[in-house]
Amino acid sequence: MSFFDGVPVPTAEPVPPWSQRPWDPPEAGFPGVVPFRTLVLARTERAAVAITGLSAYPAGFEIYVTARFRPGTDTGPGGPGPAGPGPGGPLQSFRFGLQLADGTRVIGRRGGRGPDGDGEPDGPILRMFLGGASPRSSLSRWWAWPLPPPARWSSSASGPRWGSPRAGPGWMHN
């Protein structure tokens, strides 16, 4: 006897047509996990933000960003609550960016499918495509395209509502 005996099988809903563009996060492949130590980007009395993981794909890479909020700190209206940070909360002011070895700065943006249209973007992309939060923690995944050349790059984060008014010095990664 199976656990699901007698339970009707749900009917599959049609999936809308969609084609994978090279600058979109892959949906049909698994990444290579990049050996990586947690890199703290910013730490204040109210919060700490770190890159906690990297995953590489043939065309781009994912950056895992984790934020921890100190219990008992005032995050202001709309801050962390039972459902996590809300509109106007501490994550609303979060900014994340990369600087590539050639000096190109890529400023992250939240959500969406990325650049509109089917033409290749004019430059590198950095966008948050997945995230979640609890009252004192947040995890977001950022997609970066294309892969940078084999050289150094830096990352930076800021969040004025956490007591970090501007981006700190860049952190260099190989």
Image (cartoon, rainbow, N blue to C red):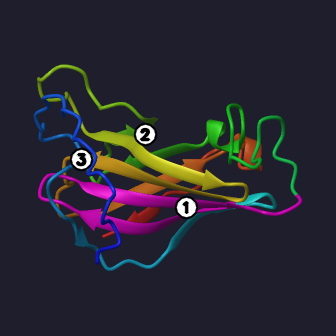
The residue drawn where x is 64% and y is 37% is: 93
Return the residue nearer the eye: 9 or 158. 9
| Amino acid type at mark 2 | Gly
Find disc 3 in the rendering and name its residue: 25
The answer for how far apart the CA atoms under marks 1 and 3 are is 19 Å
First in sequence, mark 2 or 3: give its number: 3
Res. 155 mark: none
Find disc 2 in the rendering and name its residue: 108
User: Where are the magenta residues, as a range?
Assistant: 48-72
Residue 163 image offset from top left, x and y in percent? 77, 49
Q: Quadrant of residue 111?
A: top left
Classify mark 2: helix, strand or loop: loop
Q: Please identify, in this view, whether the residue under mark 2 or under mark 3 is nearer the observer.
A: 3
Residue 50 image offset from top left, x and y in percent? 55, 64
The residue drawn where x is 12% and y is 23% is: 118
Residues packed near mark 1 inside 10 Å, few (<14), some (14 to 19) or many (20 plus):
many
Vertical side of 3 occupied by 114: above or below: above
The answer for how far apart the CA atoms under marks 2 and 3 are is 14 Å
Residue 5 image offset from top left, x and y in percent? 30, 66
| Amino acid type at mark 1 | Thr
Return the residue nearer the eye: 66 or 5. 5
The answer for how far apart the CA atoms under marks 1 and 2 are is 15 Å
Residues packed near mark 3 inside 10 Å, few (<14), some (14 to 19) or many (20 plus):
many
Q: Is the magenta stretch mostly helix, strand or loop?
A: strand
Find disc 1 in the rendering and name its residue: 66
Horizontally, is 31 left or right of 167 in the view? left
